[in-house]
Image (tube, helix red, strand yellow):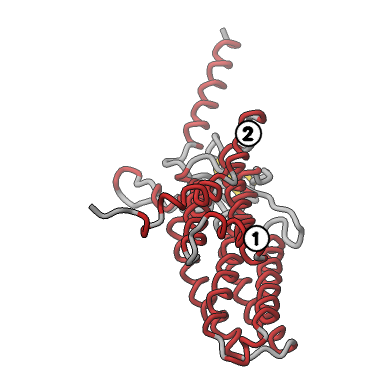
């Protein structure tokens, strides 16, 4: 009887402690203090996440392949922006810059690439483990993990309990570090390289100003839509690659099938643009499927050239001048 009563007391006290440890909400947890006791319920520190026992636990996961592809996507967007704007701004350069148009664009392309690569390396070094080219992350489970500020509980409908935290560490904060590093690298590298290669100010200042507008806008977008972009970026890549491919071919004055084929194959600029579209399309397919079912998923990669082939094959029947108006 004493043994039974003792077991019952132990069970009751254990249940009581479990109840005491529970915290309201999805993201509120307790921290283990230096005196061995647990803190009150609140937000978990950076690099930790609440576990099933409502304790803040250090994240020891490595980024998944999907996470790495997301980070690669976020790093590629500024590089593509720089490349597109450099190409477009070259049309308004002064006559002195236009005389060496090709060399100027190559220098600016190299500068933009070095800036993004340097910023990406600095962003990786700046997160835990600090100073190492590796990332320790919290596993992303739901879309709500990106918006913990919307899930602060209000116990007994009184004072709200502030449990806002980065449950997707470091996928959220790392992008802000990357954007800041991009701005610093752009301000440092581009004027130095432009001066070294004797480029005119009009050839690179506009691209610098464009970047100073782009990164704040990108940071605000990430702040509010980071989780949505994380979930939908493979589809964004595929849709944009298809639309961009159609725009690229539609800007050609001559819409004949033969001209489009010859112009695409023989002009280096067009070869590069089409290659980027194909790589983007394949990237989106791999990000969606994760190549989990090799026979089927690898077969889907055969669809990569489809937008280009479809446009060129149907240009004869889609040209506006050949459509009869009744």
* Of residues 298 and 291, the one drawn nearer to the viewer in this rendering: 298
Mark toward the viewer: 2 or 1: 1
Query: How far across and down, in percent of the image, does residue 75 sit?
Result: 61, 61
Residue linked to disc 2: 299
Instruction: From this view, report whether residue 297 is shown above or below residue 249.
Output: above
Of labels 2 and 1, earlier in sequence is 1
Left or right of residue 317, residue 87 in this image: right
Write the residue at 57% across / 74% down.
87
* Residue furthest out toward the top: 1
x and y percentages locating residue 319 in the rendered image: 41, 56
Nearer to us in this view, 31 or 97: 97
Asked whether 207 or 69 is in front, the reply is 207
Q: Is residue 243 above or below residue 17?
A: below
Q: In the rendered image, which residue does mark 1 sit on? A: 271
Q: Is residue 97 visible?
A: yes
Residue 273 position by quadrant: bottom right
Asked if the residue under mark 1 is in contact with the one under mark 2, i.e. CB atoms within 8 Å, the reply is: no
- What's the CA distance linking mark 2 and mark 1? 24 Å
Q: Splitting the image into 4 quarters, where does residue 300 fall?
A: top right
């Amino acid at each position: 009887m004493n043994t039974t009563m003792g077991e019952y007391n132990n069970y009751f006290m254990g249940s009581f402690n479990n109840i005491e440890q529970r915290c309201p909400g999805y993201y509120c947890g307790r921290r283990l203090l230096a005196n061995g006791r647990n803190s009150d319920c609140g937000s978990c520190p950076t690099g930790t996440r609440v576990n099933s026992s409502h304790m803040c636990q250090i994240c020891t996961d490595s980024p998944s392949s999907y996470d790495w592809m997301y980070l690669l996507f976020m790093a590629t967007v500024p590089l593509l922006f720089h490349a597109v704007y450099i190409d477009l701004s070259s049309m308004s350069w002064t006559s002195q810059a236009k005389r060496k148009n090709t060399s100027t664009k190559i220098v600016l392309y190299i500068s933009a690439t070095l800036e993004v690569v340097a910023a990406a390396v600095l962003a990786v070094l700046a997160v835990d483990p600090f100073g190492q080219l590796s990332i320790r992350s919290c596993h992303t489970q739901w879309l709500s993990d990106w918006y913990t500020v919307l899930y602060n509980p209000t116990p007994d409908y009184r004072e709200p309990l502030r449990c806002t935290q980065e449950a997707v560490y470091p996928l959220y904060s790392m992008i802000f570090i990357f954007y800041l590093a991009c701005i610093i690298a752009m301000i440092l590298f581009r004027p130095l390289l432009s001066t070294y290669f004797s480029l005119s100010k009009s050839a690179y200042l506009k691209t610098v100003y464009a970047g100073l507008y782009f990164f704040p806008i990108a940071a605000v977008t990430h702040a509010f839509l980071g989780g949505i972009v994380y979930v939908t970026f493979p589809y964004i890549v595929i849709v944009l690659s298809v639309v961009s491919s159609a725009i690229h071919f539609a800007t050609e004055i001559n819409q004949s099938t033969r001209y489009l084929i010859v112009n695409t194959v023989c002009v280096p600029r067009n070869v590069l643009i089409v290659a980027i579209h194909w790589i983007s399309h394949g990237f989106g397919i791999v990000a969606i499927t994760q190549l989990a079912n090799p026979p089927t998923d690898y077969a889907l990669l055969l669809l990569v050239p489809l937008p280009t082939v479809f446009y060129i094959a149907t240009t004869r029947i889609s040209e506006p001048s050949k459509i009869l108006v009744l």
